[in-house]
Amino acid sequence: MRIPKIRSPRSIRSIRPARLTRIGLAALLTVLVWIRFQVSDAADSRTLDEAGAPAVAVADRVVVDGVFSEWGGAPDALRSDGAYLYVRFRLPELRTLQGGNATTRVLFDLDADPATGQVRKDDDGPMGVDLEVTFSPPNARRDGAPGTGVSVQQFTQKGPASTVGHARAGLLFAPSFAATDFELRLARRAELNQDIATLFQNAGKASFRVLVLGSDGKEIARTARVEGPMPPLDAAPTIAPTAPPQRRTDGVRVVTWNVEKEAPMKNPAPFQRILNALQPDVVLCQEWTSKPGEIEAWFKTQLPGRGTWRVHTHGELGVAIATTLPLEPLTDGSVMPARKVNGKIRPVRFVAARVDTAVGPVLFGTTHLKCCGTKDSPEDELRQLEADAINEFVRVQLGKGQPMPVVVTGDMNLVGTRNPLDQIARDLDVDGSTLTITDAYTATGAGNDTWRNDEGQFSPGRLDYVLYADAALSAAHAYVFDSAQVDGATRSRLGVEVNDSLATDHRAVLVDLVRAPPPAPQPKPILGAALRELVTTGGSPVLVNFWATWCGPCVAELPDLARVARECEARGLRFVLVSCDAPEDVEAARKLLTEKGITTASYIKGEPDEGFIPGFDPDWNGSLPTTFVFDAAGKNVAVHEGSATYQEFLEFVAPVLASK
């Protein structure tokens, strides 16, 4: 008899489980027909297993973060769920979408019907364009040359095209910097013309293609037309009630935040409520140009219960470090990074200090790199010069005394290339390696955007980053806080209001840093049948979790899993963690487990899915993440497909621990 599932795969976190592939020709054809999965020679494509099917299938939910593992190997693809339409596309050369010397048009036929929308004739037949997203749209003031930003237009047969704001369309894309590969999302409940909205909300098929136009308006590149299914619209939109993570007592909580034109001085209440909710040990700010004494007075007045605040800042440059911990300034008017521009030495917007934390002394720095511009623009060149100066300054500081881990945060303004970010990070870890970029996501888990201005010409994007020395530190939690994305109950508990994050155009980014754990042992290969025997014959209750490095929900729940394992070990619970990564990714799996503080023995799938899945459980469909619970007699008492929280994991194992 099949064990009932604890909860539907469509979890409250609104991230649906990724899936392993069922092997076999029939299953492969089904995948090809329904999700247009393609295997190519792209850099991020996965190898084929022995039966010829993709070793990894595309996930059910796309996270718009500029990481493409959930797409499989297809360079151009269309996906949809009950709330959003997603596309991925590849351009022939490196480009910045919202600025540059080319216009990029993404054309959508929302019902795959050339008879609706604006008919565009093409070599592969007519396309009925219902919606068009145009990056760097032609600028009439520049004789039609590519401009900046993005526009969204909708087309019907009843009248001329009309423009829709990117916020009304629910537009989000990544990455913000120059790239060849991009992913884009539109809300199916977008505020559109009624006819277009109906097409968007109906179940059926949709298609898209991308055109790239040069500065003269002539086409210079295009993608193939790609079609995919659109399932029925969700009955109601949901917000994942993912609250900011619980503060670690064995680490240091860092918040980096661009406060937009010293807004806390003019409108303190939203900033006070958010910082009080997040409870940071160290706050690193940009665009706070007040005098040092004024910033320190603000923290002491607005957050009096957190201890004695100390602030180090260069007010005129707008960068500041505030903390309740012991602080030693490392920059001042004469000791700070600088760049030469047009023969003149100009200071870089950067401030640094040594802070004595629960993880030891840390060199904290925060910066606000030059804004605006695009790839190869003067602004982008200035960002590179600033990054060079910051990297050199930190190197000099580290050379003056005992090595310490480095954390650099700030508004990096990566709207050109990502080179400045890489340059800041270069060789600054305590082992001489590059600093690690923290992966922080919003409460809904749908993206990593940190900046938005719904009324402006640019759509949301990721501008704010936290870099840290992973040889000494580990990011236990990372979170982009947006008061509108958490549910009402969470806001009430935190003491924040729904529009508090609108006090600035940047969102607060939170990271909990703890001491780096010892390296995790390398996962051991295991066959499905052998794994089944292992967990059913040990004479003790077992929690088995299947995960993969490319599965976002899997990675997100690992800290909670590890916590449950630690707390229940004394009661006899065995914890078995099984990576479903490809064999060549075993080192990546080991490294990620180390980062998450999981140093117990674990396993990795040691055979293709066609043998592994039925060998362990013939009724399992191979979805990730999936958790099984076995009692001491080896009986499977619970199966949960999808991600879970710490409290839910405790509930899963409670019956087998009580009966032991």
Image (cartoon, helix red, strand yellow):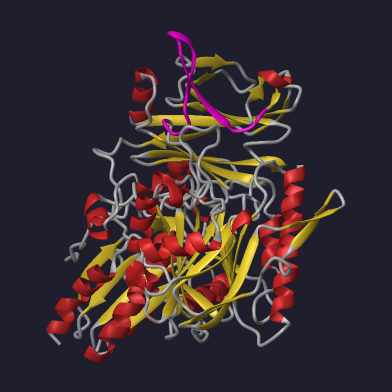
Residue displayed at 44% across by 26% down: 110
Measuring from the top left, give residue 606's x and y in whole percent. Answer: 48, 75
Quick one: 469 or 13, which is closer to the camera? 469
Q: Quadrant of the N terminus?
A: bottom left
Q: Quadrant of the C terminus?
A: bottom left
The stretch in magenta equals 147-168
Viewer can see residue 21 = no
Measuring from the top left, give residue 427's x and y in whole percent. Answer: 71, 73
Asked whether, in this view, residue 644 is left or right of residue 72, the answer is: left
Q: Is 95 contained in the magenta span?
A: no
Q: Quadrant of residue 394?
A: bottom right
Residue farthest along the right direction in this orientation: 343
Asked whether, in this view, residue 483 is left or right of residue 365, the answer is: left
Measuring from the top left, give residue 557's x and y in whole percent. Answer: 36, 67
Quick one: 318 or 137, which is closer to the camera? 318
Asked whether, in this view, residue 70 is left or right of residue 18, the answer is: right
Asked whether, in this view, residue 348 is left or right of residue 438, the answer is: right
Measuring from the top left, give residue 417's x and y in whole percent. Answer: 69, 50
Quick one: 246 or 446, which is closer to the camera? 246
Rendered view: 559 above or below 195: below
Q: Is 151 contained in the magenta span?
A: yes
Rendered view: 516 above or below 235: below
Residue displayed at 57% across by 46% down: 74
Residue displayed at 65% across by 21% down: 123
Rendered view: 432 above or below 45: below
Quick one: 88 or 51, which is closer to the camera? 88
Q: Quadrant of residue 116?
A: top left
Viewer can see residue 166 = yes
Residue farthest along the left direction in this orientation: 659
Rendered view: 492 above or below 89: below
Residue displayed at 64% across by 31% down: 136
